[in-house]
Amino acid sequence: MFAWTSAAQEPGVPKRAVRLQIGVGAGWETYRDLAMSPLLYEGIQGAAGIGIEVEGARVLHRMEGLFFFGNTTAQRIGGTTENLAFMFSGSHLRRLSPVDTKWQWHAGPALSSWGSLRYHRSLVNSNYFYDLFISLGATGSVERELRFLRRNWRAGWQLSVPVLSWGLRPSYSGLVAATPDEEETPAPYLEEARVGAFGVLTRVNSRLHLTYALPHANHLSLVYHWDMFRSDAGRHPISHAMQALQLNLSVKLSR
């Protein structure tokens, strides 16, 4: 799930700027994990994020992590899960448009990861369910300055799509073919991992942001994340979506 955007080089900003980003918010999670149940589970998640970006005259390098925690419920039967999840993204975005144009376009490669752990309170055996995906793909963004409420703002949209993924999901088709000592290590489970394109992971990550400039080249942003994926890794497919609204503070570290 992560988002990378960049603005036109601001007057007075050095050719190389380093910024730390910290954010908090909430999300709404929905999924069907057939390793667990055919029912739809949904619920509110707490969200926190941290990231760092290094912006040059024509290139932006950025790494960001989002962390989610909360419960989901299947309303039909009242089944409840306790969830922990993370999204990580790193990208190399190169400017495609001249610096003085209204619309600023960027594009480049991206490395992303999604991981989660769910504990089902109503189940006795095999009550832990997990996902882990690591992907290489492409990302692009567009931004522009605007005037609103007598203030200067910057709005942008970013889209990321993985192309090649490594995925790990539980099979729960029977006992793991391993000795008791091997079962205490991740090796038997890693043997179930798959590598491939859109069959392993079909995912779209979208990010909308509205940014207000603060003194000393700092920024305050309202960010909306939408992440959707489906995976056939393992023997039980999963369909998942996360919507999150987050308030981010960007602190400039470089002079």
Image (cartoon, rainbow, N blue to C red):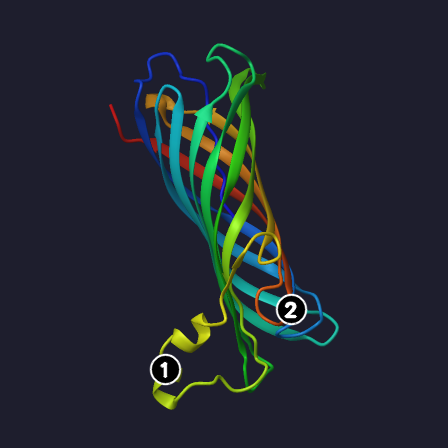
Q: Residue furthest bottom?
A: 180
Q: Amino acid at mark 2?
A: Thr
Cβ atoms at labels 2 and 1 below 8 Å apart: no
Horizontal and vertical percent position of residue 121: 56, 79
Q: Quarter holding the C terminus?
A: top left
Query: Which residue is disc 1 drawn over?
Result: 184
Q: Nearer the viewer, residue 145 or 189?
A: 189
Residue 9 seen from this side: yes
Marks 2, 1: nearer the viewer: 1
Q: CA distance from mark 2 to mark 1?
A: 30 Å
Query: Which residue is disc 2 drawn over?
Result: 73
Horizontal and vertical percent position of residue 151: 52, 17
Tell whether 6 sits left or right of 216: right
Taking the spot 54% from the left edge, 82% from the top edge, the residue there is 126
Q: Is residue 64 above or below residue 230?
A: above
Q: Residue furthest right?
A: 76
Task: State which quadrant residue 187 falls in.
Answer: bottom left
Q: How many marks?
A: 2
Taking the spot 44% from the left edge, 26% from the top edge, the residue there is 94
Horizontal and vertical percent position of residue 34: 66, 71
